[in-house]
Amino acid sequence: MSLPVKLASSVATWDERYAEPDFAYGDAPNDFLVSQGARLQGPVLCLAEGQGRNAVYLARLGLDVTAVDQSAVGLACAEQLAAQHGVTIQTAVADLGAFDLGEERWGAIVSIFAHVPAAIRQAVHARIATALKPGGLFLLEAYRPEQLGLGTGGPQNPALMMSLDGLREELTGLDWLEGAEVEREIHEGVYHNGLSRTIQVICRKRGA
Ligand SMILES: C[S@@+](CC[C@H](N)C(=O)[O-])C[C@H]1O[C@@H](n2cnc3c(N)ncnc32)[C@H](O)[C@@H]1O
């Protein structure tokens, strides 16, 4: 199945994508997040959360969830999705480059396909350990450069993708519980569709 060719980069482009009739990445949560959901404790911060499918899933588990994204249109969809499911989430429209993650504030931080510019990603990752409570978890799935050319989703710019080696340098002060290169079928809305190459990571802050 071929994907829409338009690539998202600016806030306006993301707003436009999220104004389309269907949820860009579906309204179902990411498979990796679902496989790990039971081990997460709140409050949870979902980074670059778009239309809220993952945040709403976590809220339905009973967790206190905040979703941050630069797209107000995406987060409006997230709030509607939450209301449809009878749950509440907090939303923050913000550029992650300027968003204050706080100190020892989160039981978990979730990053699902948070393909933000590399400088912003590195700055955010450098703050994850400080922002987590002791024992808190950081969970991530992202496309890796080997995804390029498959045509099944993700950014077409390798600088926006992630590798295990790169994350080991960026995510300081955390113990790695899992870090895997995965090849799997992904079917998430219109924009993630087909055999895909990702990394899946779980790290824990020491101390609990
Ligand atoms: C591929 S979408 C993933 C959305 C969501 N995590 C999901 O899996 O359904 C990437 C998201 O990153 C957001 N984003 C990109 N750059 C950002 C930035 N600098 N600050 C905040 N959000 C950003 C976009 O608005 C978009 O919602």
Image (cartoon, grey):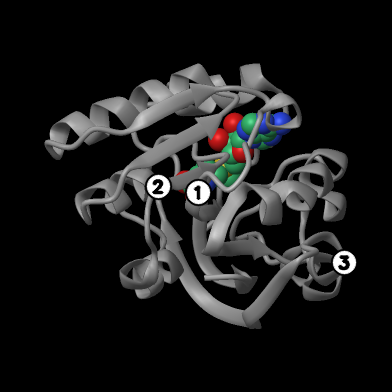
Question: Mark 3 falls on what kind of element?
Answer: helix
Q: Position of residue 25 (x, y in %)?
A: 44, 46
Assign ligand 1 to one image quadrant.
top right
Residue 106 badge: 1
Return the residue at label 3.
169
Instruction: Say whether residue 25 is left or right of residue 130.
Output: left
Mark 1 or mark 2, which is nearer the start of the sequence?
2
Whether pointer 2 and pointer 1 mark residues with C-beta atoms closer than 8 Å, the reply is: yes
Mark 3 or mark 1, which is nearer the start of the sequence?
1
Most extreme residue toward the front is 207
Q: Position of residue 47 (x, y in %)?
A: 56, 43
Return the residue at label 2.
43
Q: Residue at x 76, y 65 (%)?
A: 173
Mark 2 or mark 3, which is nearer the start of the sequence?
2
The answer, for residue 113, to whether it is visible in the render is no
Q: Position of residue 12 (x, y in %)?
A: 63, 16
Single out the mark in the foreground, 1 or 3.
Answer: 1
Image quarter for residue 203? bottom right
The amino acid type of the residue labelled 3 equals: Glu
Image quarter for residue 75? top left
Foreground residue among 70 and 22: 70
Q: CA distance from mark 3 to mark 2?
A: 26 Å
